Amino acid sequence: MAASSPSPGHAESTDRLRSAQLVLVAEDDPDIADIIRSYLTRDGYRVAHAADGRAALEMHHALKPDLIVLDVGMPHVDGWNVLTEVRRRGQTPVIMLTAYDQDIDKLMALRIGADDYVVKPFNPAEVAARVGAVLRRASRADIPANQQLRVGPVEIDLETHSVYVTVNGGRSSLTLTLTEFKLLARMARTPQRVFSRSELLAACLPEGDALERTVDSHVSKLRKKLEDAGVAGMPVSVRGVGYRLEQSI
């Protein structure tokens, strides 16, 4: 991992924009945690540190951070279980730090609900850049306020990032990751239209270097959550092309 000191020179306006955003760094190696903190502080973020998984969950509940940088291999409660619990609680964006550059680790992170991942050893500047990218996706103001979309039994509130399902007279809410929400909202704007994987990747993960199959992982997770809520077969797979939402479902 590159450990050079960060250089100054970021715009004051950017610092003001980020000054209220809190990043929780959950990492048991104090040297790695310190350098991540240094780069994030340089970029204007507030930073809290948890040295184990149990502390990470306690701090997530108490501090309600805007984003978590989460190491997989932590004591007491590992990163996978921390991520699972964070996702059960809500939509806090999570960037996983994984020790192995293996597809299974990356896909597992995405399936459980991570918004991004970084493989060790890493350049801390990359971690800071990915934090910025994920938070920009979370706060991007390109969605009109007070707007709702409805596709079949699924209702999407674009202002509050809430999703509700009405089945057999009962209304329930869904807990989605930011990326899952953006995928659903993007397709819901034009039901019946087929979206290619590259289109969805560009719309929902524009700053990353993710592969198109990353979209498949996020869609699979989204589909499972909808199925569990009583909505089967959404989104629809279009073989060799991509995905669409069916208005009639």
Image (cartoon, rainbow, N blue to C red):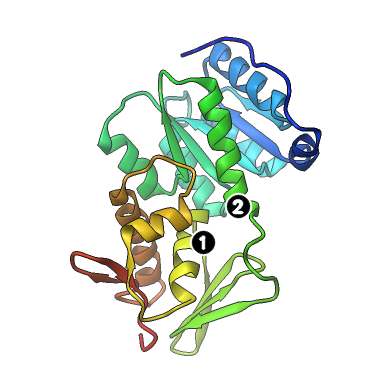
The percent coordinates of residue 14 (x first, y second) are: 74, 38
Is 71 located above or below residue 64 in the figure?
above
**SS class of the residue under badge 1?**
loop
Mark 1 and mark 2: Cα distance apart in space: 15 Å
Is 188 located above or below residue 114 in the figure?
below
* Residue linked to disc 1: 175
Which residue is at a point 32% across and 53% down the rendered structure image?
217
Circle 2: residue type:
Ala
Label 2 CA crowd tier, 10 Å (few <14, some 14–19, many 20+):
some
- Using residue 209 as the reference point, say whether residue 136 is left or right of it: right
The percent coordinates of residue 55 (x first, y second) are: 60, 30
The percent coordinates of residue 77 (x first, y second) are: 47, 31
Q: Which mark is residue 213?
A: none
For the residue pair 172 and 7, the one nearer the viewer reads as 7
- Quarter holding the C terminus is bottom left
Circle 1: residue type:
Thr
Q: Which mark is residue 138?
A: 2
Given the current orientation, which residue lies at the most extreme left position? Answer: 239
Which residue is at a point 76% across and 42% down the rendered structure image?
17
Mark 1 or mark 2: which comes first in sequence?
A: 2
**SS class of the residue under badge 2?**
helix
Which residue is at a point 63% across and 33% down the rendered structure image?
24
Is 240 located above or below residue 18 in the figure?
below
Is 22 located above or below residue 121 in the figure?
below
Q: Quadrant of residue 117?
A: top left
Please say if the residues under marks 1 and 2 sit with CB atoms less than 8 Å apart: no
Which residue is at a point 58% across and 22% down the rendered structure image?
51
